[in-house]
Image (cartoon, rainbow, N blue to C red):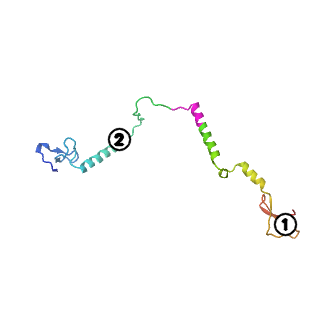
Amino acid sequence: MRQTNVSFTNNQYYTCEYCYEKYIPVRRYAQKYCSNSCRSKAYHQRKKLEIVTVKPSKKKKQSKKKGKTKIEKMSLPGVGNAAAGSALAEALTKVLTPEHKLPATKGDLNALEAKIQRYHRIENWPANVEGKLPYFDMQMKEVVYLNF
């Protein structure tokens, strides 16, 4: 029998709901267990039983909310708002992004290709026996000798 510092008569003993020992309660009518360890062990025992005995039901659980549930549907104003928001974000991105940080487009690549000449003179190679100068052909990726 576990005792506390409080003295009671024999008819005021409680029985622990976990270990079934008699004890003198510290808090009357609120205490079910003789100690914190018995309370903790009882909790873990209840949780094990819940895991073993509770099986998932095949039925869908009903929500605990009372009243009608609002179902959002696609509407023309909603689509319009989404399109307007997307267009605004795109416009702000174009306005606020510096030109040197914008991605290259196909037109940019075509303009760059037009600026690059097909043949580039190789300065540190001598002319061949016929007197033709060496050039690098940018399309064929090879060295050619031409009279320019």
Q: Residue at position x 20%, y 44% from top?
A: 27
Left or right, 46 with reference to 89: left
Quadrant of residue 89 within the rendered picture: top right
> Magenta span has 20?
no
Span shown in magenta? 72-82
Residue at 13% across / 43% down in the picture?
Answer: 12
Q: Residue 133, labelled with which disc? A: 1
Label number found at residue 54:
2
- For label 2, the SS is loop
Residue 1 visible in this rendered orientation of the protein = no
CA distance separating discs 2 and 1: 90 Å
What amino acid is at disc 2? Val
Q: Please identify, in this view, whether the residue under mark 2 or under mark 1 is nearer the observer.
A: 1
Residue 3 location, x and y as percent? Answer: 16, 50
Q: Residues within 10 Å of mark 1 (few under 14, many from 20)?
A: some
Image quarter in which the C terminus is found:
bottom right
Q: Residues within 10 Å of mark 2 (few under 14, many from 20)?
A: few
Magenta stretch prevailing secondary structure: helix
**Which x, y percent locates residue 126?**
83, 70
Tally of marks: 2
In the picture shown, does residue 68 fall above or below 12?
above
